[in-house]
Amino acid sequence: MRVEFDRLSLMIDGQRRLIRSGSLPYFRLPTQALWRDRLSKMRAAGLNAVTIDYPWSYHSHERGAYDFTEFRDVDRLHDLIEELGFFLIARPGPYVCADLDLGGLPAWLLSDREVILRCRTETGVVNSLKFLEATRDWFKQIVPRFASRRNLILVQIENEFTFPAPMAHQTTALTDLLVRWFGTKRIENRLRRDWERDLERVEPGSEKVGVARGQQNAYMYELRSMVTELGVNVPVLHNDLASRNGRQMDVDLLGVDRYPLMNLPQDWRDNPAAFDAFQGDRAALDAHRETNPLLYPELQAGLADQWGGEGFASIRERFGADAIDNLAKAALTEGAAAWNYYTFCGGTNWGYMGSPDVYTSYDYAAPIPESGRIGAECESVRRLNGFIDRFEDELCSAAPETSDSWCPQHRVTRKSATHRFVFLRNPTRDTQLIPAPENERLQLKPWESQIRVYGPDRKLEAVSPEPVEWITEDLGMPPPLPRLNLWRFSTASPQLELRYDDASWNEIPTDALERNRIDMDALGVHYGFIWYRGSFAGVLDRLILDARHSYAVWINGALVKTGDQFRNRTGVGPDGARRTRVSLSNVSWNPKRNAVVILVESLGHNKGLTDDYHLPRGLVSIDTGDTRVSWRYRGGLVRGEQGMNPVVAFSGVERSGSESVVLPHGWDGSPQGVALYESSFSLEGIDPKSHRLALRFDPGHGKANLYLNGYLLGRYWPELGPQRQFVLPWGILSGEEENQLAITLWKRSKRATLGKVRLELI
């Protein structure tokens, strides 16, 4: 496929095409059956391209090891994309962001402190040979898998790369202290505004300053060289954070992010300038490179939510189908030649793949939600694409016409050789009348963006579709679902017992303890949970620790301390962490040997919008005074759990003291540590094509992990929330065989409780 471009558009095999793509996060859809379902719905929505991020971490759990089988089989994914008639836009990274742990970089890179991730520091770009060597190895694995595809049209290297990094000054000790005191929301917003203002500043009279306003560096040049050497013969692009400065020039095409609606609690419908961020994007692009079409590799299609957030039902209501319609039309108003909805498909942060700010659901309020049941947003996209298809050639070549605004709602008129496109927007909650000579669609509904098309005879030829008024589908009488009444309850942490044999655990070397290099990455346990077990004679002199993000401490089997070092809810910048002294006044000591056990949960590595990759997770430091403690460690909440996306064989999990219980179930005292609840169910009369299932938790006390047939599908934090409903994806959920459920409940207070759990249709 021959891909060319000029200032107006991409040309594919000589034909101008207006590219309308959607991101498909295959790594958040952990069965191939879901891939076809989502791609078919994207096709029905009128998209003509699919954008794929390839997280390096999802395919490489350790240096030199790669996995492209089953739900990581990207070759099969490419076959489906091609089969359904899409163009392919490939984004191999090495950094993709996507609200993933470490932005999609494998955490094993952190084991080598000399590796400079992305070759970027707070002040500039350095030539980190070790990082480039590892990146080249990754590119050799992934690039040939898409480079030869006949439907490949674009390849993006890196993502949102610039220097100095955004909010790089958040790494200072002062900012860390402020995070500890105040949290991050106000601090982040202020620092982000200052950085973006500086980045977007344009000096008077400097509209044409050329490459000097962009950035060139050996890192981006090397990445581009790598992909072309590995067979890429289509244009290579980059997705910049801002349109006016900081743009990467070592690529064929420049693209830019657009996320105008980042503060949804303040309803965007009360802001007349909600979509004005697009204004000037074309002029800013011309100041860098006049031969470049206007591309939006990430056009907002929803919004991520954070731990303790409002939940996706609320975000979807606030965002709405009118937002996604306005965003695409605002891009067209500015003359966009291509955009990619991020993200078009919601998914699940199964396992431990998310960055620390996001929880299990990654529904994103996307046009295709996590459940797969489409609604008004997808219908809005479908209608607009049907309209665009009628005039694609003309829209690709339409340039702005110099004319005065003929009514307050007029944004711009664009003219091709044969047609004129008049763009209107009503930025209010009131219906507005437009003074057009025709009698068709003269009322602009609240926040309606409209495109009026005039043919060669200057007569009205078409008007873009009316805003969607969606009626929820009546699913009829739901089929009966199994009731999850009886559970097997047992303790899953025998390591709290004084006589537990921990010889199979790894020993922490003395020099690592002396240097306080006992964090998870230093020990090679990069995701999820880590257990530390110390044995000592006599009593502890003192116990002072720094543990991130959540932790619990037991001495001789009794819980003595729990806590959370989660002041930073953004996944960017310092943790605001501090050392904590554990009170030993009520500990019952044994005359000879004693044991201290510490369980620490990492909520993930920061996603790297600033240079904070080496923030440690797990037990960062520990001080036991003059007491000599022999330490061992083991990764995984339960035995056999490992990696970013664990699939646990529960037949091998340590357990004791089993009994049958009915939910809700709670207890004081023993058992301490982690309890295990297990149940099973079969499905009859449930059609995977029309029925979608989830598991809902009633409120309880204590953090929990949810496993379906061994797959870790949910991390439940009832004290923080907001998520209580967890999608059970078909392919992992079986309609034919018995399904095994396991819930691990971490007792973090005097009383632990697992509320009632039930299956429900969604």
Image: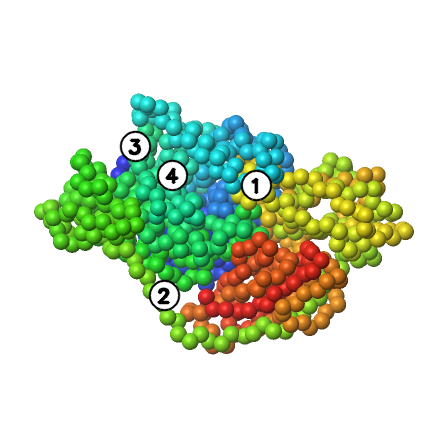
**Image position, residue 169 (x, y; %):** 54, 31
- The x, y position of residue 453, in whole percent, is 18, 48
Kindly indicate the quadrant of the structure image that contains residue 130.
top right
Picture layout, residue 437 above or below residue 687: above
Badge 1: how crowded within 10 Å, few (<14), some, or many (20+)?
some
The residue under the point 54% across, 65% down is 696
User: In the rendered structure, which amino acid carries the disc numbered 1?
Assistant: Gly
The label on residue 472 is 2
The residue at the point 67 percent across, 72 percent down is 661
The residue sitting at 19% across, 54% down in the picture is 441
CB of mark 3 within 8 Å of CB of mark 1? no
Vertical side of 382 occupied by 688: above or below: below
The residues tagged by marks 3 and 1 sit, at their Cα atoms, a distance apart of 38 Å
* Position of residue 182 measured from the top left corner of the image (x, y, whole percent): 57, 39
Is residue 297 visible in the rendered structure shown here?
no
3D distance between C-alphas at marks 2 and 3: 42 Å
Give the SS element for disc 2. loop
- Whether residue 476 is visible: yes
Which tag, 3 or 1, sits closer to the chain's start? 1
Tag 4 and tag 3, C-beta contact below 8 Å: no
Upstream in sequence: badge 1 or badge 4: 1
Q: Label 4 amino acid?
A: Val
* Residue type, mark 2 in image: Thr
Under circle 4, the secondary element is: strand
Element marked by disc 3: helix
Badge 1 vs badge 4, beta-carbon distance below 8 Å: no
Label 1, on which residue? 183
Residue 256, label in figure: 4
Mark identifier at residue 283? 3
Q: Residue furthest front?
A: 430
